Amino acid sequence: MAGINKYSEEEITKRFVPKNWTEKQASSSWMLFKIMAEFVDGFETLNAIGPCVSIFGSARTLPENPYYQLAEEIAAKMVEKGYGVITGGGPGIMEAANKGAQKAGGKSVGLGIELPFETEPNPYIDHDKYLNHRFFFVRKVMFVKYSQGFVVMPGGFGTMDELFEALTLIQTGKIGKFPIVLVGTSYWKGLVDWLIETMGKEEKNIHLEDMELMKIVDTADDAVQHIDDFYSKYMHQLSPNF
């Protein structure tokens, strides 16, 4: 934690160092080119991957954790249905999902992110389908643009960020109504109850029908079935990944 705090202090301090006009312009222009390059690299790499499902979850989940094993099973079953699997490319749930997809013979995609405390990408990503991002917002665009559904395993702040990004975009009509599956009733029930009772009924900050955008399940079969049922009437339009 000390390392993270030190990094934060350095970043904050940089914001207060005076820069002249030339330095500001040069910095902004270079940042713009880096952002453009990251988008181009992502589009060129992922344009031909076919239908995929993004699986989100904690990087801290250990292999002996039942959720790790469940993520691996879900990914393998998604591959059997003709979908590839996209993860954040790291350890934990992400590793489990990539592992399940690769072992089942499907496409295994990793969208990594440069962090001061991040590890190397997990070894179960297809060598030609790994992207290492500098910017979180570019990475989230790739998740949303190339996913036909989202499976959300237990996770932390990053998982919540990805979940609510997808919900917000669907709710506001910025993307289509893709299926979102939350795995683990005991993990998600408290959050879902709060969203319904406090955010919905008490404060009326969402419509209660918005909660229908998510489905909570506990098994791999139910997770896959929900996404497969959603697309069953469109399957003639989807090309399998293998």
Image: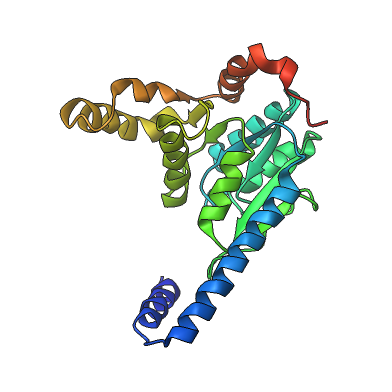
Q: Quadrant of the C terminus?
A: top right
Above or below for 190 versus 222:
below
Determine whether, in the image, residue 78 is placed left or right of residue 156: right
> Can residue 122 be seen in this snapshot?
no
Residue at 60% across / 14% down in the picture? 229
Q: Position of residue 197 (x, y in %)?
A: 22, 27
Q: Quadrant of the N terminus?
A: bottom left
Question: Which sits in the foreground, 80 or 43?
Answer: 43
Q: On the image, which quarter does residue 199 sit in?
A: top left
The residue most toward the left is 202
Q: Position of residue 175 (x, y in %)?
A: 51, 33
Residue at 62% across / 60% down in the picture? 36
Q: Position of residue 214 (x, y in %)?
A: 44, 26
Residue at 67% across / 49% down in the picture? 110
Q: On the image, which quarter does residue 227 sit in?
A: top right
Question: Which sits in the foreground, 206 or 80?
Answer: 206
Above or below for 169 versus 193:
below
Residue at 61% across / 67% down in the picture? 34
> Can residue 27 be seen in this snapshot?
yes
Q: Position of residue 188 (x, y in %)?
A: 39, 33
